[in-house]
Image (cartoon, rainbow, N blue to C red):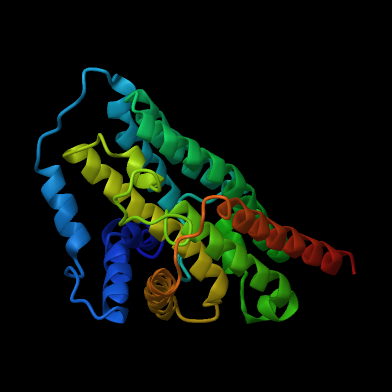
Amino acid sequence: MTALAALPPLCALVLAPLLPGIITRTRCWLTGRRGPPLLQTYTDIGKLLAKGAVYSRTTTAVFRAGPLVGLAAVVTAAAMVPFGTAAAPLAFPGDLILLCGLLALMRFATVLAALDTGSAFEGMGASREVQFAALAEPALVLALAVVVRSTGNLSLSGAFGALTSAAWASEGAALVLVLGTLFVVYLTENARVPVDDPGTHLELTMIHEVMVLDHGGPDLGLIHYAAALKLWVLGALLVGVALPVQDLMPWAGLLVALAGMLVLAVLVGVVETVMARLKLLRVPQLLVGATALAVLAVVLVMRGRVG
């Protein structure tokens, strides 16, 4: 493995906890508050990892395995996503299916751990999580399929490597629809406003946070770190489509991709500031709309290929 190929997962492992800090700082700056330090997520994870864990007698090994399985799944997913001009270390034809499967496995482990507690609140959050995931996953798969189809490469690294300015000139309309789909999926999968609010403390409106109420210490630290990694993985996909950096030098492409991740985090902070959380009945409509955008992108790409 070359040094350039090792950069995508290395950047994810080191810089992922910075994204929640940027989002929070953006919200605080726009609302006139001081807010926590930019590196607060790193501090929180460090403190949690240094603590002990307390387990309810009603839980089993499923509860303890949930954070570990979720972290392992998202770390593997991070090794499959290209970043900048660097290809992913784990790249092979059809890897987008495994990537979506790993993200689903992460969610599955968290949902099982929540159900293992026997808590009504956590079961309610798990039910909502699965409902929204069933609508978000088709949108994600279709959006990535459009990228693969428009470039003629079955591997994510090959497909993103072929997303040049010329590709945007020929498939620009479909790629714009893909960006809209990926942004909605990005907010949904990472439990951000307007789908969920990671800062809420109202049990009846919580989704992701209510599933981890019984986790503490190192387990909660692993969950927070895995959530930051997921934020990075899906963000890298979105930035990879939005910024065709393949015509640049390798290090210049990396810097542009990092700047894109910064802009994306700031954009999420702006969205969370100017928008309120949607009613739960409105969220499925939003996700169906994202899937419709992806389907339309598929139609545009297929018509372009036929023509």
Q: Which of 77 and 3 is in front in this view?
A: 77
Q: In this view, does 150 lie to the left or right of 17?
A: right
> Residue 9, can we see it?
yes
Q: Which of 44 and 98 is in front in this view?
A: 44
Q: In this view, does 99 lie to the left or right of 40?
A: right
Q: Is residue 195 left or right of residue 163?
A: left
Question: Could you say which quadrant of the image residue 1 lies in?
Answer: bottom left
Q: Where is residue 116 in the image (x, y as percent from the top left)?
A: 35, 24
The residue sitting at 59% across, 42% down in the picture is: 134
Q: In this view, does 168 lie above or below 235?
A: below
The residue sitting at 27% across, 28% down in the picture is: 64
Q: Which of 204 and 222 is in front in this view?
A: 204
Q: Position of residue 77 (x, y in %)?
A: 44, 48
Q: Where is residue 256 in the image (x, y as percent from the top left)?
A: 42, 79
Q: Which residue lies furthest to the right in this view?
A: 307
Quarter of the image where the C terminus is located: bottom right
Q: Which of 16 and 252 is in front in this view?
A: 16
Question: Could you say which quadrant of the image residue 268 lies in?
Answer: bottom left
Q: Position of residue 29 (x, y in %)?
A: 27, 80
